[in-house]
Image (cartoon, helix red, strand yellow):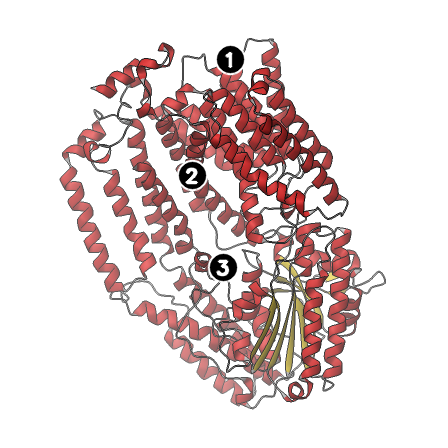
Amino acid sequence: MWIAYALVVHVLLLGSIFVIYFRSPVITGLTPQKRLLHYGLEPPANRLVLIVTDGLRADSFLEENCRYVPHLREIFLREGVVGVSRTRVPTETRPGHITLIAGLYEDPSAVLRGWKSNPIDFDTVFNRSSQTYAWGASDVINVFSHVSNGGLMHLRFYNHDLDFSPGYDAYEQDEWVFKRVKLLLQRKSEALQRAKHVVFFLHLLGLDTAGHVHKPGAPKFRQTLDKTEKGVYEIYQVFERMFPDKRTAYLLTADHGMTDSGSHGAGSPHETDTPFVLWGSGVSRMVPNPGGRTFMPNNEGPAMPLLELEQAQLTPLMSALVGLAPPMNNFGMLPMGYLNVSTEYEAMAAHINALQLLEQYVALQKQHKKGFFAGILLEFDVLTTEAIKGYKDTILQLQKNREYSLCIVRSQVIMSQALEGIDYYHGYYRRVLLLSTTSTFLGWMFYIYRLLSRNRASKVELVLERSNKIVRMSIGSSVIVLVICLLSQRTPLDISFYLLLPNFVWLKALQPWNINFYSSPASAYSVPALQTSMWQLILLIACAELMVFTFFERRLIALCFFVFACYNSWGNFKTKSRDFFFWLALVLILSCFPLLPLSVGYQNGYLLGAGVVVILTNSFWNSKSRLSYRKHTKYSNVLILLQTILCAYLHSNGINIPIPLKLVSWLYLVYAFASIVLSKEPRLDLRLAQIVFNLGSLYATLCTSYEAVFVQLLTIELNFSLRAQSARAERSVLRLAFTLLLYTFFSLFGSGNIASISSFDPNIARCYLSHFAPFVIMGLVLLKLLVPVVLIMSVVYAQSEFVRQHEEQIFICLLLICDVMGLNFLFLVRNQGSWLDIGTSISHFVIMEVTTLVILLLFYTAKQLLRVIPWEEIDFKRLPLRLIHWDVISAKHH
């Protein structure tokens, strides 16, 4: 039953960071601001063309003095401005487009709908416009399809499940967009020439696909970039011919960047820094550049200013160019000096932006004041109701006196204060939620510590048994009082839930022994040899803290592995024996792998071939294992390994992989697991040999370089050291739990991964797919991450009798270490600072909480593959005497 509790508690703890740090930014019930035309101000442009080159990072645009964007360079050398816009984490397609078009940072609760739909509808530039025409990939265009704008939303999209094999030209996706834009302009040219407040949106996915497949900087990526930027220039010329009034504004930018390995989602500069080029009607050539950054547009010079903006600032800027009010949910501040308009127009645009931000701030302020305890709770005293009224009166007076420069300054100040106030009320309960979640963590850890120690005679257990009624009454009373307070204050339901959660966790944790652990099968843990002392608890916490540091420095786990392996296994071998030197060589070689470059995005056919050789050598070296394999196992695994080499060769030479080979890969994926499950081999060591052979071969199909070599050597080392350890009398639950955790993380970092939820390489699917199917690729990525863990669990189960007999206690100890680490990462989560820090901190907490759940599930998976008989079903009379712990048996039957 405690396993079910573990799953529920950790899912809730995983959700806590979204409630604490990343609450939904969407505020409802807002009133839109009026257009600038309402104030008698004519906008500088009648139409806006927004071109988003998906996945184009700033470095690729500026590389070698803009050598790879010659046509765009021709534009910005003549007019407009160039700069870098910074996105926020997660640097994904959907959040980037929402930020650009709505000025809104992604709603975290959208993850509950698979990022496919919006939990709460939000306002966009499309809503504010009179007409919007959009073309692009379905998953981007459909984000904005909920918009109701009097039937004047014209959306055209394609299903981007397109070929991403080496021979495929990703530019075809962009060409699809350009053709349909030209077709529309030809068909509706007269009507569009008369229209105002029109937005054209072109989503170009080709560079993102090329970056994932070929990596930024590769020749094929640059070929796609060359075609795309030329296509943009041609479509610009089409617009200029179609609208000769010179009242068209253009913005070219990207939703996110991309790492050298072709991934995105985290917060590195390559992922967050995207280019923007703004030109056309209403765009100023002389823009303030407080950062002072410059770039060389060509080899001759001179240097040009490289401007810097937050991605959300582009939203009010686009709105101001065509005379629209910013979207109601916008968080961007209009950058000053970018508009080639009168000072009066710029001042009014800034004022409307300020009013739109104040509308959101006032809505949150009113919601806070509705609470019963609002009078005694803290408020954001920088921006009071009187200050807002004073700002509006001051602006009216300054406008009458035509002091528009002062209007701009006052609006900028009030916008900054409004954003601070919005953040203040969004995070109003952050500290108390952090304390509450910490209390939940501690309550859960106390519960599993009692589960681990199982000492009914301890002072703690006796006190809890005597004070059971007092504890229940105290916690019950606190719940009633807290519920009344939360209802009176009108606290949101999700916040109320997490404030109440610690009470229920502690109620469970403080229950007496006979209630809490009555149905537990491991009631024999009170045996003195198996109890957990205070010193062991301190050592357990120290182990957890040590593992925390490895998340910040991947190479540190090499030192951890070497030291622990020597401490754990050095004494198990005869000094200067052949086995000792073989084991030591394995440890030294494995310790070098975390020092190698990341395998994500790195491809090396020779290292992959070496991995295949190691798999075959490991599988056929032992004659007993070799003879135990069925013929279909030998032939299937050898053939799939040869096919893996063939697929890698074809892919690296730009040759499309035939569909029959991909079909064989999918069939083998099913076979690899099915043949293990259906095998009737009763011996654990022979079942383990088949698991290592099958899953090792399956893992090789997902590798691009040295990962297969590493995982096979790690499996051999663990197998070897556990066999040598089996004769030892001393067996430690803590040591085995830490072994499992260390080897799990070592399999992650040593195989070239990093502690980020966004690190993946779609090329691992080359044996399986030729189409860009994100969810299928992500499934294969997860399979690649989990297979080494299943191998580790299987080796430990097969080689250690102690683990099989005390698996529950070992897992509880493992869970406790993971929770100590999770509590560390809870306090290290950041929602301010550099996007790299924010993305990394989120990834660490998510990985830690998910790891706890995954290890639990993979324990069960390894048992099923090995067909390990549960403890309750063991017939003790038929066991060899050396396997029986007589103290445990007698305690179990009394």
Residue in the image at 33% along x and 57% along y: 495
Check disc 1 and report the residue beneath it: 571
Quarter of the rendering containing residue 661: top right
The kind of residue on which mark 2 rests is: Thr
The residue at the point 60 percent across, 68 percent down is 157
Q: Looking at the rendering, in which quadrant would you find the C terminus?
A: top left
List the residue tagged with mark 3: 115
Residue in front for this viewpoint, 319 or 303: 319
Asked whether the beta carbons under mark 1 and mark 3 sit within 8 Å of each other, the answer is: no
Q: State the residue in front, 86 or 729.
A: 729
894 lies above or below 240: above
Question: Dot 1, how many residues are within 10 Å of its Cα: few (below 14), some (14-19), or many (20+)?
Answer: few
Relative side of 326 to 451, left or right: right
Q: Secondary structure at mark 2?
A: helix
- In the rendered image, the vertical position of residue 804 relative to residue 237, given as above or below: above
Which element is circle 3 on?
loop
